[in-house]
Amino acid sequence: MANIFKLPKALCKAANQFLAIADFLNPLASVAIRLWIANIFWKSGLTKISNWDSTIILFANEYKVPFLPAEAAACLATAVELSAPVLLVIGLAARVAAVPLLFMTAIIEFTYQSHHDHVIWAIFLGLILLQGPGRFSWDYFIRQKSCGEKEVVGNFSSFVAFMATLALSLFASYHVFGIMGR
């Protein structure tokens, strides 16, 4: 019986070249995403501590967080915005750092201001949460040294992550341009 799943050699070669490109780009994309998201939240945290009285007034009147007093919400938001970006930049406990930032993004989107940028933030934070910070991170270095793993991300998982990133980027672009075109 013939193997119906056998691919032509030219297609296999093209697929392997594509996977090699994905393996090369994936860690670079991970770093770019981490730096971009960290920059957004870091600047927001710096703005909050630059004038604390205004921050408290904003949380009391404008940024009303359900179930939290304004002072507590301001302290918590500022602490997260000044600590999580540092962890993202160095790639240490990056998945843990992405969780409160993702939660904050949802709070911003659903209680204060709906904006298409929040969808992009959520997608990128979701990628960090699901895929991790990538090869250029302390998390990767620690995992290699403690687990003795030489290659944590193989070709297939790299391909899946690359395709998921591409699909989510296209979705986000469609969503952004769809909103902006209205």
Image (cartoon, rainbow, N blue to C red):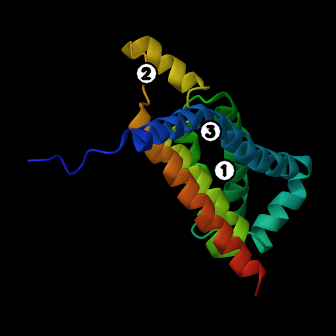
The residue at the point 73 percent across, 75 percent down is 177
27 and 4: which is toward the camera: 4
Q: Amino acid at mark 3?
A: Ser
Q: Which residue is mark 2?
A: 151
Which numbered disc flags the more N-terminal residue, 1 or 3? Answer: 3
Camera-side residue: 144 or 79?
A: 144
Name above or below for residue 73 compared with residue 46.
below
Residue 99 in view:
no
- Residue visible at 66% across and 50% down in the picture: 76
Can you say whether 116 is above or below 22 in the image? Answer: below
- The disc at residue 76 is 1
Give the residue type at disc 2. Glu
Q: In x, y percent, where is residue 160?
A: 44, 46
Question: Could you tell me the amino acid type at mark 1?
Answer: Leu
Q: CA distance from mark 3 to mark 2?
A: 16 Å
Q: Secondary structure at mark 3?
A: helix
Quadrant containing the C terminus in the rendered view: bottom right
- N-term-proximal mark, 1 vs 2: 1
Q: Residues within 10 Å of mark 2 (few under 14, many from 20)?
A: few
10 Å crowding of disc 1: few (<14), some (14-19), many (20+): few
Residue at 17% x, 46% y is 3
> SS for tag 2?
loop
Q: Which residue is mark 3?
A: 30
Q: Nearer the viewer, residue 66 or 81?
A: 81
CA–CA distance between discs 1 and 2? 37 Å
Q: Give percent across and percent down for residue 151.
A: 43, 21
Task: Give the vertical position of 138 relative to 145 (above or below).
Answer: below
Q: In this rendering, is residue 169 above or below 115?
A: above
- Residue 93 appears at what percent x and percent y? 54, 32
Quarter of the image where one finds residue 181 = bottom right
Left of 99 or right of it: where is 69? right
